[in-house]
C-alpha cells in the first residue's frame, strides 16, 4: 500500500510502498478515506530537535483520520465492516492506576500513532477497537478527519467553566481557532485571541472571537483596557511560545485559571511573581479525555458548532508536498488530504 514515511533522518517526507498491516485480536483494519496534517507532522517533516529524539526513521506518520472498517479481528464486538470511524490516537496501557480509574488521558504508558507506532497517512491502518469513535452519518468526513485536534481544543476549552467569563487564547493555530469557537459556543463573554499571523487571526475572528490581536503590532494590555476588563478569568495557552505565555501571565485577572496545551521549548522562563501574587492556577492538558471529550465534540458539531470554518484546504494525497509547504508558511487552517 501507499504510505507517507519518514524515510531518512533529515528534512522531508516520502511516499513509499509498505506492507498492509494485519488486524490482530481486538483490532480492526481501516481503509483511510481522509487524513489531516497536524503541526506534529510538520515537526517530523522539518526534523526538528523534538523529532530527532522521538521518531525512528521508517515510521508511517499521521494521526488525524477518518476511514471505513474493512476487516474485524478476532474478539471485536460492536463494530462491523463498512462502519465509518475516526479513532483516539493515544493507545493506553489499560492496567495502570489512571487507566483503571477512568483517567486514560493520564496514562503514563501512552503510545501515539504516527509518533511511536505506524500512523494513518497510508491506505490502511490497524487500530485497537477500543480506540474507535464511530462517526454519525450527519457529520461529513472532511470534518471527522480532524476530530483529533478538535479534541485537543475541546479538552482545553472545556477544562474550566468559561460561561460568562473573559477568555484569552494565545496562538491562533488550528487548535486556538477551534477553541475560540468552542468558548463562544458554550457562552464565554469576551474571547480574545492573539497571534503574529494575520491570516490565522482572521480565521479566529470568523470563528467568533470577540477581538483578535496581532501582538507584533498591538499590545494586549491596550486591548484589555479597550474592552473595559481588569484581566482574563481563563487563559488557554495554544502557541507554545514563551512570549505569548508571558503576555498571558501579565494580563490574567487575580485568581485566573490557565490551561496549557502549547508545547514550550525546554527551559522556557516564567515570571513566578505573576503566578504567585495573582494566585493563578496552571493546568497542563494532554490529548483528549477518553471518551468524554469525543462525546462532547460530536454533540457540539451536531448542534451547530461551525467546525468547518477552520477547514481551509482539501487536497489529493499525491499533492502532499503542497500541504506541508502551506503548513510551513502558516497560510492555512486545517488541511485535509483525500486518499480515495
Ligand atoms: P500551530 O503551531 O499551528 O499554532 C501556534 C500558533 O502560535 C501559530 O499560529 C503561531 O503564529 C502562534 N504564535 C507564535 N508566536 C506567538 C506569540 N508571541 N503570541 C501569540 N501567538 C503566537 O499549532 P496548533 O496545531 O494549533 O497547536 C497549538 C499548540 O499545541 C502547539 O504548540 C502544539 O505543539 C501543541 N499541541 C499540544 C497537544 C497536547 O496534547 N498538549 C496536542 C496537539 C498540539
Ligand atoms: Zn495506563
Image (cartoon, grey):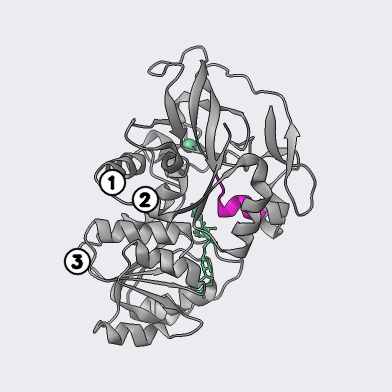
Q: CA distance from mark 2 to mark 1?
A: 9 Å
Q: Residue at x 51, y 82 (%)?
A: 216
User: Label 3: which residue?
Assistant: 164
User: In the rendered structure, are the residues bearing label 2 and label 1 in contact, judged by CB atoms less than 8 Å apart?
Assistant: yes
Ligand 1: does it lie within 8 Å of the C-beta at label 3? no
38 w.r.t. 219: above or below: above
Indicate whether residue 319 is drawn in magenta. Answer: no
Q: Nearer the viewer, mark 3 or mark 1?
A: 1
| Closer to us: 168 or 211 | 211
176 w.r.t. 336: above or below: below
Label annotation for residue 300: 1
Indicate whether residue 40 is drawn in magenta. Answer: yes
Image quarter of the N terminus? top right
On the picture, is 76 further left or further right than 5?
Answer: left
Q: Magenta residues?
A: 36-43
**Main secondary structure of the magenta stretch:** helix
70 w.r.t. 47: above or below: above
Q: Residue at x 60, y 58 (%)?
A: 327
Q: Considering the numbered disc 3 on the image, is that residue within a helix, a strand or a loop?
A: loop
Q: Which percent across, then down, holds residue 317? A: 62, 40
On the picture, is 204 further left or further right than 318?
Answer: left
Q: Residues within 10 Å of mark 1 (few under 14, many from 20)?
A: some
User: Label 2: which residue?
Assistant: 307
Amino acid at each position: 500500500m501507499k504510505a507517507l514515511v519518514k524515510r531518512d533522518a533529515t528534512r522531508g517526507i516520502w511516499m513509499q510502498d509498505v506492507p498492509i498491516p494485519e488486524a490482530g485480536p481486538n483490532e480492526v483494519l481501516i481503509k483511510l478515506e481522509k487524513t489531516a496534517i497536524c503541526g506534529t507532522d510538520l515537526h517530523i517533516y522539518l526534523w526538528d530537535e523534538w523529532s530527532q529524539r522521538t521518531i525512528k526513521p521508517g515510521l508511517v506518520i499521521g494521526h488525524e483520520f477518518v476511514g471505513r472498517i474493512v476487516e474485524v479481528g478476532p474478539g471485536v464486538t460492536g463494530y462491523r465492516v463498512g462502519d465509518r470511524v475516526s479513532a483516539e490516537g493515544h493507545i493506553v496501557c489499560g492496567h495502570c492506576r489512571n487507566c483503571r480509574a477512568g483517567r486514560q488521558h493520564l496514562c503514563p504508558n501512552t503510545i501515539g500513532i504516527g509518533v511511536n507506532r505506524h500512523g494513518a497517512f497510508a491506505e490502511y491502518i490497524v487500530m485497537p477497537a477500543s480506540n474507535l469513535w464511530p462517526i454519525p452519518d450527519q457529520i461529513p468526513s472532511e470534518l471527522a478527519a480532524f476530530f483529533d485536534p478538535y479534541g485537543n481544543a475541546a479538552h482545553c476549552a472545556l477544562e474550566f467553566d468559561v460561561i460568562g467569563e473573559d477568555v484569552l487564547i494565545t496562538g491562533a493555530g488550528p487548535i486556538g481557532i477551534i477553541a475560540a469557537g468552542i468558548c463562544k459556543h458554550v457562552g464565554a463573554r469576551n474571547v480574545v485571541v492573539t497571534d503574529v499571523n494575520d491570516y490565522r487571526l482572521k480565521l479566529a475572528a470568523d470563528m467568533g472571537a470577540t477581538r483578535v490581536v496581532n501582538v507584533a503590532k498591538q499590545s494586549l494590555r491596550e486591548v484589555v483596557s479597550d474592552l473595559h476588563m481588569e484581566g482574563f478569568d481563563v487563559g488557554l495557552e495554544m502557541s507554545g511560545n514563551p512570549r505569548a505565555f508571558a503576555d498571558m501571565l501579565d494580563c490574567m485577572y487575580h485568581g485566573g485559571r490557565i490551561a496549557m496545551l502549547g508545547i514550550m521549548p525546554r527551559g522556557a522562563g516564567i515570571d513566578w511573581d505573576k503566578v504567585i501574587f495573582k494566585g493563578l492556577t496552571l493546568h497542563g492538558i494532554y490529548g483528549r479525555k477518553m471518551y468524554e471529550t469525543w462525546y462532547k465534540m460530536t454533540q457540539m458539531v451536531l448542534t451547530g458548532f461551525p467546525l468547518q470554518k477552520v477547514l481551509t484546504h482539501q487536497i489529493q494525497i499525491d499533492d502532499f508536498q503542497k500541504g506541508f509547504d502551506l503548513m510551513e508558511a502558516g497560510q492555512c487552517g486545517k488541511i485535509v488530504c483525500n486518499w480515495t
